[in-house]
Image (cartoon, grey):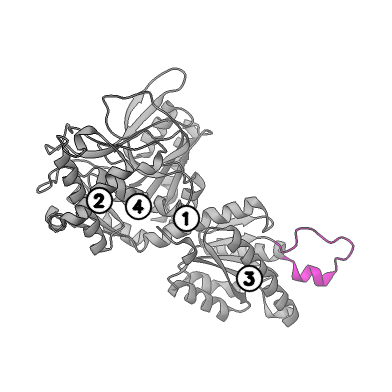
Amino acid sequence: MLKLKSHEVWLVAGSQNLYGREVLDQVKSNSKKIAKFFNDKISIKVKFYDVVTSPELILELSQKANSNNNCIGLILWMHTFSPAKMWIDGLINLNKPFLHLNTQFNDKIPWETIDMDFMNLNQSAHGDREFGFIVTKLSINRKVVIGHWKDKDVLDKINTWSRAALAKHIWRRTKIARIGDNMREVAVTEGNKVTAQIKFGYSVNGYGLGDLINHIKATNNGKINELIEEYETSYELSDQLKVNGSKRTNLIESAKIELGLRSFLKEGDFTAFTNTFENLHGLSQVPGIAVQRLMADGYGFAAEGDWKTAALVRAMKVMSEGMDGGNSFMEDYTYHFQSNGSQVLGAHMLEVCPTITNEKLRCEVHPLSIGGKQDPVRLVFNGTQGKGLNASIIDLGNRFRLIVNTLEAIIPKKLPKLPVARALWRPDPDLKLAAEAWILAGGAHHICYSQSVTPNHLKDFAEMLDIEFLLIDSNAKIEEIKNELKWNSIYYDNRN
C-alpha cells in the first residue's frame, strides 16, 4: 500500500521584487492558506514552497525539486505579475511535471473598495498569461487549471493531476521482472525496452524460471500452512481443495508458488512482472491465484511477457490508490453481437485481479486447455457493474501511444462451464465503432481494465510523459478518429 501523503506537490507563487516587502508578505500568507486548503482536500500532500522573485530563486527551486525524492511535481501560480524571462532557466532545467494554476485569492471583485493596491496584489489574470506565454514558447507540457482555488472543479482537476504525477514518479523507480520470454511469434507484446527506460524510467529485465524455482523450493511448511489457512478463511473453497479433497495437493502447490513469487519479487525490489505459459519448466502449474493476489496487493502484471501492459497496470494501481473500484490485467476474449447493444467478454486464462469485484470469491481448481501442466488453482468471480475503461499502451517504433476506451460494465449471465474470473462490458459508443477505432489505432488485445481510473487521469499521465493519447468514448466518431490518427502521425513524424 502506498502512503499517499508521504509524497509532495509543492505550491509555488511567482512574483517580483518591484512590489516591496509588504506585498510579498501578503502573497506568501495567501499562498500558505491555499496550500493548506489543498492539503486538506487532495490525496497527495500539498506543501507551500515559497514566493520566487528572481531567476536565481527559480533555478534553485528547480534544482531542489529535481533532487527531492518526495516531490512529485509543482503547482505554479502567479499571484502578481512575474516577468517570464525569469522563469526560462528554471523551467528548462526542471524535470518534474508541473500544473499551472490560474486562480486568484479572492473570488469576487470588491466593487466599493477596489483600488490600485488591490489590483497590483491580485493580478493573476495578468501574471498567469505572461507565464503561460513562456511555457508555450519553450514547448513544455503542463496542465492548466483555471478557477477559484476553493471550487470543486479545480480541486478535482488538481487531485486527478497529482495522482497521475505520482504514477509518473513511481514509474521512474519501477523494476519489472520478465520471467521467461515473450509468447512466441506474438507482435504487440514486444517493444523496445531500452527506449521505454529512456522515456519512462522503468527497467525491464529477463529472468529464467530457475531464478523463481529456487525461491519456490525454499518455502517452508509453516509459511505454506499459514497461507493455506488464509485461503480457507478468505475464500469459498471448492470441495476438491478442502482437507482430504482430491486436489488438495494442487492448493499446496499454489501456495508454494505464491510464496516463492513474493520472495522473488521482494528480493529484486520488483513491483511488476510478467510470465508466459510457454516457459514453465520446473513449475507444476500455471500461476493463477498467486498472480491474482499479487495484483490485488498493487503489483503490475501481464501475461506472455507483455511488459508494457504490466507497467501500465502498475501505474494505474498507483493512480487509484485508496479510490473505489479496481484495476486488472485483462484481455478481450469474445464478442456477443446483438442488435440492442453488443458486448465483450473479457478474461484471461487465470490472471484477473479480484479488486474489480464485490462478490464472494470462490477458490476453485480446473483443467487448463493449454500449458500441459497440473490443474491450476484460481479465484473465480464476475466483475462488478458500472462505468469503467480499457487502456492499452503500444510501441509504434518512433513513439508510444496510449489508447483508452470508456465502457459500461454489466453482470454476465451464469457461465457454469467457464471457471475463470471475467468481466462483461459494452464499449462506448458501441462495439462496432469502438472495435474499429481500437484496431485502426493498433490497440493490443492485452489491456488494463479499470473501474477507478478515469480518462482524465490517463490523459494527464500521457501529457506528462509526452506520448500520444487517443480517447474512444461516447462522443467518438470514426472519421474523426481516423483524422486524429493521421494528424498525430504527422505531428510525431515531424518531431522525430
Q: Which mark is residue 164?
A: 1
Measured as percent of width and height from the top left, residue 181 is found at 18, 49
Please report the bounds of the magenta region as a residue range. Answer: 104-123
- CA distance separating discs 1 and 4: 19 Å
* Residue at mark 3: 13
Q: Main secondary structure of the magenta part?
A: loop
Q: Amino acid at mark 4?
A: Asp
* Residue at mark 2: 227
Q: Amino acid at mark 1?
A: Ala
Q: Residue at x 43, y 31 (%)?
A: 434
The residue carrying pointer 4 sits among few (fewer than 14), some (14 to 19) or many (20 or more) residues within 10 Å by Cα, namely some
* Residue at mark 4: 297
Q: Residue at x 17, y 35 (%)?
A: 245
Q: Is residue 111 magenta?
A: yes
- CA distance separating discs 1 and 3: 22 Å
Is residue 391 shown to the viewer in this render?
no
